[in-house]
Image (spheres, rainbow, N blue to C red):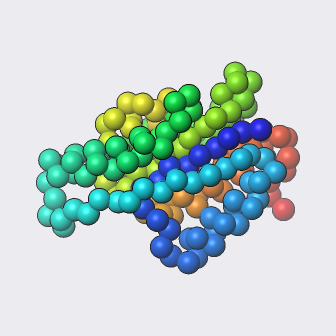
Amino acid sequence: MYHISILAVGRLKEKYLASGAAEYFKRLTPYARIEVHEVSDESFSDKHGPAECVKVKDVEGKRLMKHLRRNTYLIALDRRGKTYSSKEMAGVLEKLALEGKGDITFVIGGSLGLSKEVLDRANILLSFSSFTFPHQLMRVVLLEQIFRWLKIARGEQYHR
């Protein structure tokens, strides 16, 4: 069985997002042991420059790194990462399980993205799209996709 963690900057504040996340947690229970660790987001000014962006991402990155298990396989969500189809990602998860790497952590950055330290530690940089998504919404999308990938990996039909 997979042990999947999601590390995320910020809390799910909107009720509809929390409800969606809870639904996918429930659906994922037969497929994986899943947990979420949230770290607080760092505030920054509306007129932030490049140096402030780096500082904010570094502070958030250090908070995220404290929650990483030493041997976890880290997949960082980053718009500059590689895009995969759902079937391809199911294959990635299957391959990791066969290699004994069922301890997987997905990390979602804050409004400004992820720090260099987190990106450098990642085994895969994963892009869902070249679009920018709110990081809170991305958590629900990620949970849905993990559920989809695990259903595909088991040869089960996803759509009803």
- The image shows residue 152 at horizontal and vertical percentages of 77, 43
Q: Quadrant of the N terminus?
A: top right
Q: Quadrant of the C terminus?
A: bottom right
| Residue 129 visible in the snapshot | no
- The image shows residue 92 at horizontal and vertical percentages of 65, 32
Left or right: where does residue 18 sit relative to residue 23? left
* Residue pictured at 66% horizontal, 56% vertical: 144
Q: Nearer the viewer, residue 42 or 130?
A: 42
| Residue 10 visible in the snapshot | yes
Q: Kindly give the residue lying farthest to the bottom in the view shown.
A: 15
How many numbered discs sit on the rendered protein?
Answer: 0
Left or right: where does residue 50 sit relative to residue 27? left
Q: Nearer the viewer, residue 126 or 65?
A: 65
* Residue pictured at 33% horizontal, 50% vertical: 60
- The image shows residue 116 at horizontal and vertical percentages of 31, 36
Left or right: where does residue 54 sit relative to residue 29? left
Q: Quadrant of residue 134?
A: bottom left
Q: Quadrant of residue 96?
A: top right
Left or right: where does residue 47 sit relative to residue 158? left
Q: Kindly give the residue lying farthest to the top in the view shown.
A: 99
- The image shows residue 17 at horizontal and vertical percentages of 56, 71
Residue 65, relative to residue 28: is it above or below? above
* Residue pictured at 14% horizontal, 54% vertical: 49
Q: Nearer the viewer, residue 102 or 142?
A: 102
* Residue pictured at 22% horizontal, 62% vertical: 44
Residue 14, relative to residue 52: is it above or below? below
